[in-house]
Image (tube, rainbow, N blue to C red):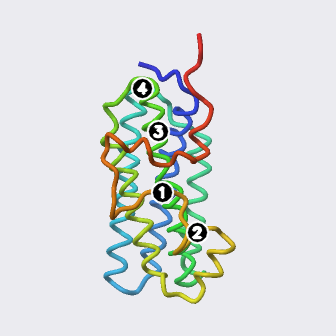
Amino acid sequence: MKLNHPVLVDLLRRAYSAERAAAFAYVGHANSLRDPAAKKAVKQIEDDEWHHRENVLALMRRYDVPVSRHYEARFFVIGKIISASCHVIGRFMPYFFAGKLESGNVCEYFVMMRHFQALGIREHDEVLYEMGIKEKEHEVYFLDQIRDSRWLPWFEKVFSWGAKSALNDVDLANKIPVLESHRYCQMHPARSGGGPRKK
């Protein structure tokens, strides 16, 4: 079965490649840390990203969505640059920008879920929900590492993410069940337009 939904197809292809970029970035981030517990935590997040990439690939294969060479090349370079930069930009910025990245990634999976549902496909709700929630857990972890930093209020003003602002509306303490999770990320820009093509 092919997906008659250009926006969903693009989201899948982009997420597949972006997950590798994130994993590469966390390799560099973990290697830049001295504390063994911190290294282990970031390494686990890296492993989560590889797992997400496998999940997205499974969906792409199910619906005959080809991997984008453009996205693969673009995000490969981005991931490697971020990975290398973690060794020279100090402790705060790798945690901050990782948290901001994860905050934005949360909604991608809930938006994908809604697009699948628009096509009458509900069988992927659970895996997409789990990936969205896992990205939120990553965001919270990174934020917790810098919550008391004197740099956070300034960076939050400039980059619109931090202790008082997020790029999603998921609350881990009050999670919405899978069947109601279409309520998440209603204002996310990727949700508008790009519905099924009319024949």
- Residue placed at 37% from the left, 55% from the top? 133
Q: CA distance from mark 3 to mark 2?
A: 23 Å
The kind of secondary structure element at disc 2 is: loop
Tell me where residue 142 appears, x and y as whole percent: 45, 73
In this picture, residue 194 sits left or right of residue 95: right
The kind of secondary structure element at disc 4 is: loop
The disc, 3 or 2, on the residue closer to the chain's N-terminal end is 3
Q: Which is in the foreground here, disc 1 or disc 3?
A: 1
In the displayed structure, would residue 128 be above or below residue 8?
below
Q: CA distance from mark 2 to mark 4?
A: 35 Å
Q: Which is in the foreground here, disc 4 or disc 3?
A: 3
Tell me where residue 7 appears, x and y as whole percent: 57, 33
The disc, 4 or 3, on the residue closer to the chain's N-terminal end is 4
The kind of secondary structure element at disc 3 is: helix
**Residue kind at label 4, given as amino acid type:** Tyr
**Residue kind at label 1, given as amino acid type:** Asp
**Residue kind at label 3, given as amino acid type:** Met
In the displayed structure, would residue 126 be above or below residue 135?
above
**Residue kind at label 2, given as amino acid type:** Trp
The disc, 1 or 2, on the residue closer to the chain's N-terminal end is 2
In the displayed structure, would residue 21 be above or below residue 159?
above
The disc, 4 or 1, on the residue closer to the chain's N-terminal end is 4
User: On the image, numbered disc 2 is attached to which residue?
Assistant: 161
- Residue placed at 62% from the left, 32% from the top? 193
Q: Crowding at label 2, few (<14), some or many (≥20) Cα neighbours within 10 Å?
A: many
Determine which of the numbered discs, if any, sits on residue 112 in the image: 3
The kind of secondary structure element at disc 1 is: loop
- Residue placed at 63% from the left, 67% from the top? 160
Tell me where residue 195 appears, x and y as whole percent: 57, 27
User: On the image, numbered disc 1 is attached to which residue?
Assistant: 169
User: On the image, numbered disc 4 is attached to which residue?
Assistant: 63
The disc, 2 or 4, on the residue closer to the chain's N-terminal end is 4
